[in-house]
Image: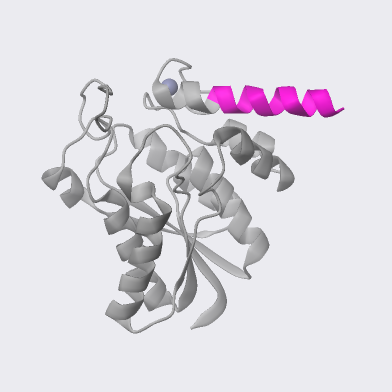
Amino acid sequence: MDKNKAIVVFSGGQDSTTCLFWALEKFDSVEAVTFAYGQRHASEIEAAKEIASDLNVRHHILDMSLLNQLAPSALTRDEEIVQKEGELPSTFVPGRNLMFLSFASVLAHQSGAKHIVTGVCETDFSGYPDCRDAFVKSLNVSVNLSMDKDFVFHTPLMWLDKKETWELADQLNRFEYVRNHTITCYNGVKGDGCGECPACKLRLKGMNEYLNEKEGIR
Ligand SMILES: [Zn+2]
């Protein structure tokens, strides 16, 4: 097992791209894995490919269309994105991070990597149960038991809000890159996005908060 090798779960969005830069600083060898599960927009996978190629990172794209077969959500079907009071938003894909982290671990097993990095975050808006710290820690234990390995799951964004995630990108000297090359938008618009969907609003709010704060410090 290579103690200096990491697999990054990578979607081409702001969070996982920031994690990819974080991992490149921390580990000698980094590979990225993107799961294709019938995302609304093929542009997300294209953005992921471009970023991995820009950074010279080996990029695995794995077919996870069974997730869409089992659990259609507004992220995979052309459904309206809604969040009713007290319910999970329609963008929730049950089992997604369970599957992604499990398959990333299988890949890590094959490639000899000790570390698995994911951009899940407990702080922000969505309340997805599989973004919780307790879940990631418990899966880390289960995966290690299942493969008799000692993988380490890393969640550099777990306790950051969007403003702080922008700050981290800036600390890594990658603010502009993350801003211009990633896709977070539910409508598949790169960079600052459509500006209207919940993902864009959250991203822009955090970015403006960060830029205002930085301006204030100067
Ligand atoms: Zn948008």
Residue in the image at 37% along x and 34% along y:
126
Is residue 212 on the magenta stretch? yes
Q: Which residues are magenta?
A: 204-218
Ligand 1 appears in which quadrant?
A: top left
The foreground one among 106 and 85 is: 85
Residue 4 drawn above or below residue 127: below
Task: Describe residue 217's horizontal placement relative to residue 192 as left or right.
Answer: right
On-image quarter of the C terminus = top right
The foreground one among 17 and 84 is: 84
Residue lying at the far right in this picture: please name it: 218
Residue in the image at 62% along x and 68% along y:
27
Residue 193 percent location from the top left of the image: 49, 22
Q: Main secondary structure of the magenta part?
A: helix
Residue in the image at 39% along x and 50% along y:
132
Task: Describe residue 173's horizontal placement relative to residue 38 as left or right.
Answer: right
The foreground one among 158 and 100 is: 158
Residue in the image at 43% along x and 80% along y:
150
